[in-house]
Image (spheres, rainbow, N blue to C red):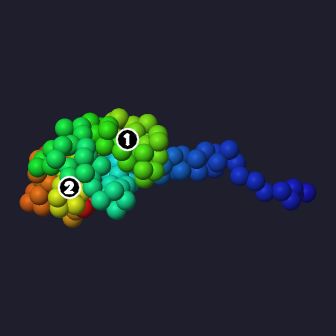
Amino acid sequence: MKNGKSAFTLVELLIVIALLGALAVGLLAALDPFEQLKKGTDTGVRNTVSEFHGAVIRYYAIKNQMPWCADADCSSVVDSFNESGSNDLEDLTQTITNIVNTGELKKDFTALAGSATLAKIKVFGSNAGGSIQVCYKPTSKSFTNDPNTKFDPTTGEDNCTANPDPAQNTCLWCVK
């Protein structure tokens, strides 16, 4: 008399588990988990860059001056803002406060972004021209090879040729 039940044997189950394990190891090797972490970090920094850029534009629309201006004609600036060069966002505390006070950034923007993220962001701008450019240096290969990674780290000019190796690249990715 035959039993009507059919089932997998323990050996067959172990073979299937071993094959799934081998596929998982192959997938991990193909995805390069460290590159994925760098892409995640770059995405977060890029979002902060875009958020700050948009907030400065909205501030300018409301006040008709840039947030680093200490007076109406911008003859003096806060945070020692350099209108002819690079400024680190982490050093622009009063500028950020001015934007927060108009409601264009959340009160806890600095805490939410974190000092490590703010340290990676460069700001270039001019009140006279009403221009703002917010940038960062990508760490992942895909963001380094983005066509928008072409800006000089000291002047913000569009004259930098990106090196495909993120460790050797000096060019910045910017929002104008």
Q: Which of the numbered marks, if any, corresponds to residue 28?
A: none
Name the spot of residue 167 as percent of width and height, x first: 18, 43
Whether residue 170 can be seen here: no
Looking at the picture, tell me which residue is in the foreground, 133 or 32: 133
Amino acid type at circle 2 is Asn
Picture residue at 70% right of the left edge, 48% below the top = 9
- Quadrant holding the C terminus: bottom left
Residues under labels 2 and 1: Cα distance?
18 Å
Local packing at callout 1 (Cα closer than 10 Å; few below 14, some 14-19, many 20+) is some
> Total label count?
2
Q: Which residue is mark 2?
A: 127
| In the rendered image, the vertical position of residue 36 relative to residue 80, given as above or below | below
Name the spot of residue 101 as percent of width and height, x first: 42, 45
Picture residue at 47% right of the left edge, 42% below the top = 107
Apparent side of residue 37 relative to residue 119 in the rendered image (left or right) = right
Q: Which residue is mark 1?
A: 97
Looking at the picture, tell me which residue is in the foreground, 4 or 35: 35
Looking at the picture, tell me which residue is in the foreground, 120 or 13: 120
What SS does tag 2 mark? loop
Whether residue 104 can be seen here: yes
Amino acid type at circle 1 is Thr
Local packing at callout 2 (Cα closer than 10 Å; few below 14, some 14-19, many 20+) is some
| In the rendered image, the vertical position of residue 103 relative to residue 130, given as above or below | above
What SS does tag 1 mark? helix
